[in-house]
Amino acid sequence: MTQPAGDTPSAPHLDRLLVDYLAQQSVERGLSRNTIAAYRRDLMRYTAWLAGRGVTEIHQVSTADIAEYQRTLAAGSADRPPLASSSVARALVAVRNLHAFARAEGVAAEDPAAPVTGPRLGRHLPKALSIDDVIRLLATPETDTPVGLRDAALLELLYGTGARVSEAVGLDVDDVTGVLADPGVGLRLFGKGSKERVVPVGSYARAALEAWLVRGRPDLVTQGRSGTPALFVNTHGARLTRESAWWVLRRRAGQAGLADDISPHSLRHSFATHLLDGGADIRVVQELLGHANVTTTQIYTLVTVEHLREVYALAHPRARFPR
């Protein structure tokens, strides 16, 4: 293991460094509790592995140690099964971030994780529903109950605008009143990093939102002890959470006979894929999705190409050899 050359900064114990790093991620970067918990699990496994090799301080860690740790995760051990490449890659990201933090804070003279490359991952195409499946899903909410009207408005909004579920449940009534009053007004959404974008709202989503606001929301809001500005509320009159929106989709997907791995993001994927299938320019789709870089949006073009291949294979008489 590499020893520090010359003068090195005061090096804390790895456990102390881990506490400081997680605190910084929580307070300064504002990461969610789930993300912090995942980092903690990955890094506690890492520091425990290092301790087993007699490494307890940050300046003692070498590039060879980190490379060996990565191989151990991939190969497994007597007490741990091998991890999938995606899990190894995630664990290595946590390790990289910890060492980059130590270097930036001046408690480590070098970053031994920088030269270590993670496993190559296959590119996973986003899951998009067919148009028929989307129509079947959107038809499941009943329109004679407040909950059904809410679910219909939520699903129509997610598919009709490509909004992230966090953006949808974060909307207030005031955010949509102008949109409903004037079809030419777009809906303002605030995405990652509070980046604002304006998206059009189609006639189906507009009609569902109007029905919800007039005939559904008032009944549910009266269940709460105090008024809320939230557009979407639960049966207690409080703002609908991301988790509750996820359950709404799962329940409605089950009623529609769709796969049980559908998430609110599936509607966002479907929104983008169906736009591209319909001839929309990729730059327009990028703006509608709120992607900072067009390369993020380009993955949806792979979905449409895959769809074209499937159609070709089924429809063209010379696509496949006869059996």
Image: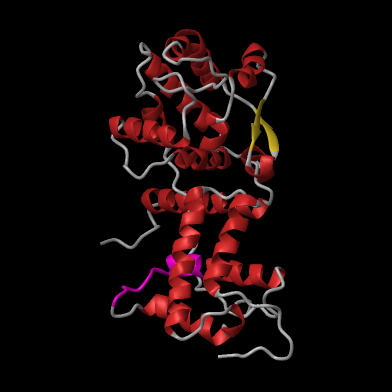
Residue 93 location in percent, x, y? 55, 67
State whether residue 66 is above or below residue 18: below
Using the rendered view, name the quadrant where residue 278 is placed: top right
The reply to whether residue 203 is visible in this rendering is: yes
Q: Tell me the chief SS of the magenta region.
A: helix
State the image coordinates of residue 2 (x, y, percent, origin top left).
60, 90
Q: Position of residue 79 (x, y in %)?
A: 29, 76
Residue at image coords 54%, 41%: 277
* In this picture, residue 272 sits left or right of residue 130: right
Residue at image location 52% in from the left, 70% down from the top: 15
Against 114, residue 294 (above or below) is above
Quadrant, the N terminus = bottom right
Image quadrant where residue 106 sits: bottom right
**Magenta segment boundaries in residue numbering:** 79-93
In this rendered view, identify the residue nearer to me: 31 or 75. Answer: 31
Q: Is residue 257 left or right of residue 74?
A: left
Up-down relation of residue 114 to residue 121 (above or below): below
Percent x, y for residue 190? 65, 35
Q: Is residue 92 magenta?
A: yes
